[in-house]
Image (spheres, helix red, strand yellow):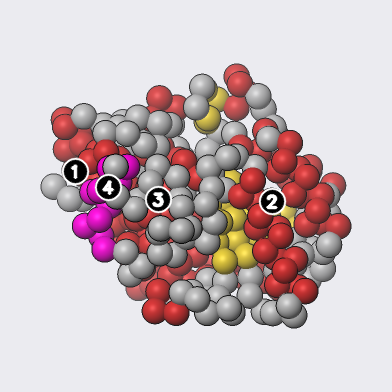
């Protein structure tokens, strides 16, 4: 990837992170940590990888994206705003009773949302079904789903892995956000589901590991996923929970709480808004 494009994507990702903080601060609730850790891959998906267009939201040939870890809706809403699906200013209405931006994505009310999600494990299962439907339709569309590392403790995730491997869904790409933290602590303290790579390979998957915050590595990974035939791909991205906000990074306490006014100002400074 050339230097100029990386600079452009980095700026979009910065604005996505700003939107995440604006949304959670305005609501005084939400999940900033895991939203921040996926800001770069969301940026790459919506601005480089996926065939999507906010002006053609009903195009049957569009690619599909499922946020399986639906509590990280601030990240999805923020990238949808940057891509032109919703107004950026609406992020400040997040979780308000009159807002269409609910605490978890709702496909009935939010432009660009392909699946109502939040119950962990269900998103990747539906994504696998979407990929099989595309195969049955003989369509070229691809399906992407982001799941959390804590979410991978759900048995339904492994049922989806078995299903996708069995049906050789090479149009399906999971992105596992491996930040090492979940709501109650680190994976090794709570319930360690690793090694993910060996487990997915056992189900017949193509496995790629990347630095979640390096656009060159993301580009190479998604190109390799497209080139892989006969099996689904999982991109395991090693990420930093709370990436970009100094006091949130690598702190599981920021899994599901909002910054106060002083912390909000620090976050905005960290993200280049002050």
Q: Where is residue 161 in the image (x, y as percent from the top left)?
A: 76, 49
Q: Main secondary structure of the magenta part?
A: helix
N-term-proximal mark, 3 vs 1: 3
Residue, disc 3:
75
Up the image or down, 80 lies above or below 196; here it is: below
> Label 4 vs label 3: CA separation?
20 Å
Residue, disc 1:
269
What segment is highlighted magenta in the picture?
Answer: 87-96
Nearer the observer: mark 2 or 1; the answer is: 2
N-term-proximal mark, 4 vs 1: 4
> Label 4 vs label 2: CA separation?
30 Å
Nearer to us in this view, 8 or 258: 258
N-term-proximal mark, 2 vs 1: 2
Residue at 50% in and 27% down: 183
Locate residue 244 relative to residue 194 in the image: left or right. left
Residue, disc 2:
125
Disc 1, SS: helix
Which numbered circle lies on residue 173?
Answer: none
Residue at 26% in and 63% down: 87
Q: Can residue 102 be seen in this view?
A: yes
Disc 4, SS: loop
Residue at 67% in and 64% down: 130
Residue, disc 4:
98
Q: Are marks 4 and 1 in contact (CB under 8 Å)?
A: no
Q: Is residue 228 visible?
A: no
> Label 3 vs label 1: CA separation?
19 Å
Nearer the observer: mark 4 or 3; the answer is: 4
Q: Position of residue 56 (x, y in %)?
A: 44, 79
N-term-proximal mark, 4 vs 2: 4
Q: Are marks 4 and 3 in contact (CB under 8 Å)?
A: no
Q: Where is residue 251 in the image (x, y as percent from the top left)?
A: 41, 28
């Amino acid at each position: 990837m050339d230097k100029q494009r990386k600079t452009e994507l980095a700026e979009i990702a910065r604005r996505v992170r700003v939107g995440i903080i604006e949304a959670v601060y305005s609501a005084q609730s939400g999940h900033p940590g895991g939203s921040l850790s996926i800001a770069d891959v969301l940026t790459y998906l919506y601005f480089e990888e996926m065939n999507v267009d906010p002006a053609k939201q009903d195009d049957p040939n569009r690619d599909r994206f499922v946020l399986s870890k639906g509590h990280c809706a601030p990240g999805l809403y923020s990238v949808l705003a940057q891509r032109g699906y919703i107004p950026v200013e609406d992020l400040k209405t997040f979780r308000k009773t009159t807002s269409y931006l609910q605490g978890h994505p709702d496909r009935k009310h939010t432009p660009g949302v392909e699946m109502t999600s939040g119950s962990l494990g269900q998103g990747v299962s539906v994504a696998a079904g979407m990929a099989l439907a595309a195969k049955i339709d003989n369509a070229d569309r691809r399906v992407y789903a982001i799941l959390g590392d804590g979410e991978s403790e759900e048995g339904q995730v492994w049922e989806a892995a078995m299903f996708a491997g069995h049906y050789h869904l090479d149009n399906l790409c999971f992105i596992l956000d491996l930040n090492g933290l979940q709501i109650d602590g680190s994976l090794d303290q709570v319930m360690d589901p690793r090694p993910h790579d060996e487990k997915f390979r056992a189900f017949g998957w193509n496995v790629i590991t990347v630095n979640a915050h390096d656009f060159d590595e993301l580009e190479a990974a998604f190109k390799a996923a497209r080139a892989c035939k006969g099996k689904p791909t999982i991109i395991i991205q090693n990420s930093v929970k709370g990436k970009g906000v100094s006091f949130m990074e690598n702190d599981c306490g920021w899994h599901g709480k909002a910054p106060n006014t002083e912390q909000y100002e620090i976050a905005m400074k960290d993200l280049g808004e002050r």
